[in-house]
Amino acid sequence: MTTLSDTSSDHLVGADRVFPVEGTSALGGVVRFQWVKAIWLLINGVGGIVGLVWFMRLDAVLIFLLLTAITVCAGHSVGMHRLLIHRSFSTPRWVEYVLVWLGTLVGMAGPFGMIKAHDMRDWHQLQTICPPHPSHDARFFKDAYWQMCCTFELSSPPRFEIESDVRNDLVYLILDRTWMAQQLVIALPLYLIGGVGWLLWGCCLRVFISLVGHWMVGHFAHKQGAQNWRIKGLPVQGYNLPRLGLVTFGENWHGNHHAFPHSAKLGIERGQVDPGYVLILCLQKIGLAWSIKLPTSEPYRTGLVRIGTFSEADFVNRF
């Protein structure tokens, strides 16, 4: 069993909420089936299939595309990931609430659940030995089952503590306790305006595709792909998935994110499309975003090296 004395102490930005205590082990745990997660996935999957088979209409497809783009880009990528978890830029609190609420509508978890799932995974991936669940080391279908229907529970976990201004915020408390019910906020208008078709496409299919899509990006982005940076000494590395920038809104540049977790810009190399960062720049233009962090805004991570034929000097000069 590997204890913290055997592992790396370097933390990713966004994983500073994890505090190892005496006896903490990153390996002593079990993958446990979660009925709530599985039933949630099943309900939305079945509803999505019904929508595809019996309610295939252009207006329903457009609603699906629009709401998926808004919730995944503005909500998950910008609101939950880059803002709430990594604090890679700043906004007025009301804008933060809107973005995080949109992220909750993606259907993965509430704000506290998302922070914990993300930070514990990052903490595991910083260890010299990372278990198969948080490293996505299982085969395709087994990893799908693990990530979307199970949790990894440690027998001797570290202490996890969300910063007080977030954990004591009434809006976030409500969102976290009612994250599934938040779908009703848009489900009712969808049903009243477009009937069952809009409801199934705009809620069920959207949530199901978002859940599966999020898992697939995480699965492949920890397996293989393009890589311009590497962190020495760690068994789990991030990889970029080229040509997926538009459909993932920049979350496909996971190798870049491992290298510079504090950066609001994920598509940091030439030609890397990053719609999430474009949205942040748009917010900045109208005065609703500031203190935007870039790769060079903070010191390099311990062990970070440039690989391949790419010039580090050319990269730095761009920022």
Image: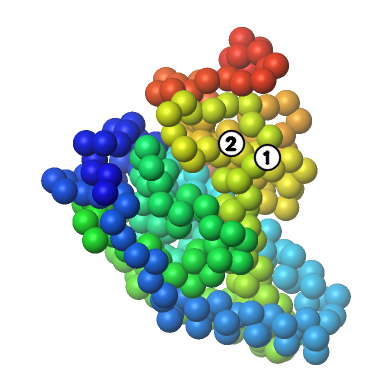
Hey, what amino acid is under mark 1? Gly
Answer with left or right where residue 153 lies relative to residue 317: left
Q: Which residue is mark 1?
A: 225
Residue 59 x %, y %: 82, 76
Foreground residue among 131 and 51: 131
Q: Nearer the viewer, mark 2 or mark 1?
A: 1
Is the residue marked by circle 1 packed among few (<14), some (14-19), or many (20+) residues within 10 Å? some
The quarter of the image holding the C terminus is top right
Residue 201 x %, y %: 71, 78
| Residue drawn at 58 percent across, 20 percent down | 306
| Residue drawn at 57 percent across, 45 percent down | 222
Q: Which residue is mark 2?
A: 255
Badge 2 vs badge 1, beta-carbon distance below 8 Å = yes
**Residue 173's image quarter?**
bottom left
- Helix or strand or loop: what does disc 2 sit on? helix
Answer with left or right where residue 252 lies relative to residue 135: right
Foreground residue among 205 and 28: 28
* Position of 166 relative to 191 (above/below): above
Residue furthest toward the right? 58
